[in-house]
Amino acid sequence: MMAAAVAAVAAGAAALGRPAMAQEKNASLMQYDGPDRAQKILAAAKEEGAVTLYTSLAAGNLRALIDPFEKKYGIKVTVWRASTEKVLQRTLSEAAAGRYEVDLIHFGAPQLEALHREKILQPVKSPIFGELMPEALPAHREWAATILQVYVQAYNTKLIKKEDLPKSYRDLLDPKWKGKLGMNTDAWSWYATLLQSLGEEKGGKLFRDIVATNGISMRQGDSLLTNLVTAGDVPLVLTVYQHMPQKAKNGGAPIDWFALTPSIARANGIGIARHAPHPNAALLFYDYMLSATGAQQVFSSIGYVPTNTKLPPALPNLQIKLVDPVTVLDQVDRWNKSFDDTFIKHSNNSAMK
């Protein structure tokens, strides 16, 4: 779960032990901004001929992202794919042991920020940064957001009529929602960000009242929640990534989604390892992942919200507030406890495991 992964880093990777920091391998092009930047990077990347990516991206989407890159540049991309927590653990463990096998890491922004704090990433200067939404780039430039995963609400269209949907979170106090609501057990960062908008005291009381009045079935995993809505077991869920119910809807399932205001989103992004064995191929792939003519188009086509503003807005009508990765790292214990006290401790759902 995300809380466990973040807590492990917040406690410090020092427990793993760190070797003396070696010099970055050929990082000169990371900051190069001459007019021949693209040509220099391509030539150096082709000499290396390969790049290694650690990622938590869905396995079913990887070939759609990687195949165009390999075909265009003739550079082999080796992927190690696992959960966010496992990617984080492997990256930290290898760095602590002085094993430099990974070139790029792509997963959640809080975890990337953690890698920045542990001095595992290196800063990059890219002309594509000017095309990204401002929130996609931290000041240190050691990672950049590629996509937003937007939390929305999803419902079973056979059980709930569109005109009966809640218009605000306060509408969830209506007794007609008793026994019909669900939520992800790992949605504490959504909750923290939402309460920062609603007001911590006011928002906290609202959700405590909703739980007391109507209950919320706590389930682990967005895929499971999407399936439960489709099956009608949980008629309405409060937290699921938008691309999941949209994909199910496109496949003919009795599910649709809507968005209460404000909509909360988490960023996923990419960073280049400080000791990348293939730094130039990594830089080429990094630019590709942020480019409007590269992976950003692919992300858009498979339902994600890209961060490159040259592409048409994926969800133009939503008022989106981003989860702050710094807050997630620095306040994980406080917000995780608040979430548990509000939702988890009051759920008797055996499916929480």
Image: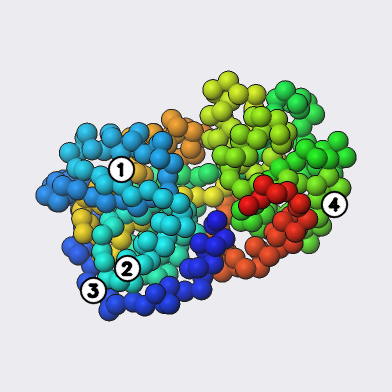
The structure residue drawn at horizontal position 74% and vertical position 55%, both measured from the top left corner, is 343
Under mark 4, the amino acid is Ala
Disc 4 marks which residue?
Answer: 212
Disc 2 marks which residue?
Answer: 95
The structure residue drawn at horizontal position 49% and vertical position 59%, both measured from the top left corner, is 110
Which element type, helix, strand or loop, lies under badge 1?
A: helix
Disc 1 marks which residue?
Answer: 288
Label 2 neighbour load within 10 Å: few <14, some 14-19, many 20+: many
**x, y (%) of residue 37?**
20, 50
Does label 4 or label 3 sit earlier along the sequence? Answer: 3
Distance between mark 3 and mark 2 Cα atoms: 11 Å
Label 1 neighbour load within 10 Å: few <14, some 14-19, many 20+: some
Which element type, helix, strand or loop, lies under badge 4?
A: helix
Please indicate whether residue 172 sits to the left or right of residue 144 in the image. Answer: right
In this rendering, the count of numbered labels is 4
**x, y (%) of residue 209?**
84, 52
